Image (cartoon, rainbow, N blue to C red):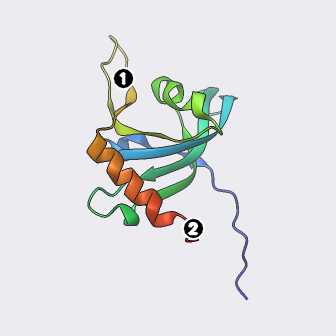
Amino acid sequence: MTDPFSNPASGRFEAKAHNGKLLLIQPLEYLAAVPTVNGPKDCVDGKVVVIDEANPAGSEVIEGARIFGGQLIAATKPFVNKGMVFGRLGQGTAKPGQNAPWVLTDATDAEKDKARAYLASVAPQL
């Protein structure tokens, strides 16, 4: 018999690996001052779906994603346990001496259709 239980997943979401991708994010929890190698940082934990634009049903699902970065937190924190956030991941303008922040840009109607196609592919059949 196969064990039906999985261990909880948790890990930092690597924005750099998904630059330019459409992301459907389900924020589940806001965590303040999480210990990291660079000191305590705030983050949002949740589920991230990297939408496969050619085949939405084959999209990559990242359970237990830990999202860091001020602008990504600001874009997702208001929706913790309230819904989903959808947009294209990119980088904003860097302030002098700092790295460019990761941001979610608004999705077009055509891009939203790809997210809807993904959701339809995983919806329970009634």
Secondary structure, mark 1, is loop
Q: Is residue 14 left or right of residue 80?
A: left
Amino acid type, mark 1: Asn
Mark closer to the observer (2, 1): 2
Image point (34%, 13%), residue name = 95
Residue 7 percent coordinates (x, y):
70, 63
Screen quadrant of the C terminus: bottom right
C-alpha separation, residue under disc 2 versus residue under disc 1: 42 Å
In this rendering, the answer to whether 50 lies above or below 80 is: below
Image disc number at residue 125: none
Image location of residue 80, percent across then percent down: 63, 35
The answer to which image quadrant residue 79 occupies is top right
Nearest to N terminus: mark 2 or mark 1 = 1
- The secondary element bearing badge 2 is classed as loop
Residue behind mark 1: 99
User: In the rendered image, which residue does mark 2 sit on?
Assistant: 124
Going by the picture, which residue comes out furthest to the top? 96
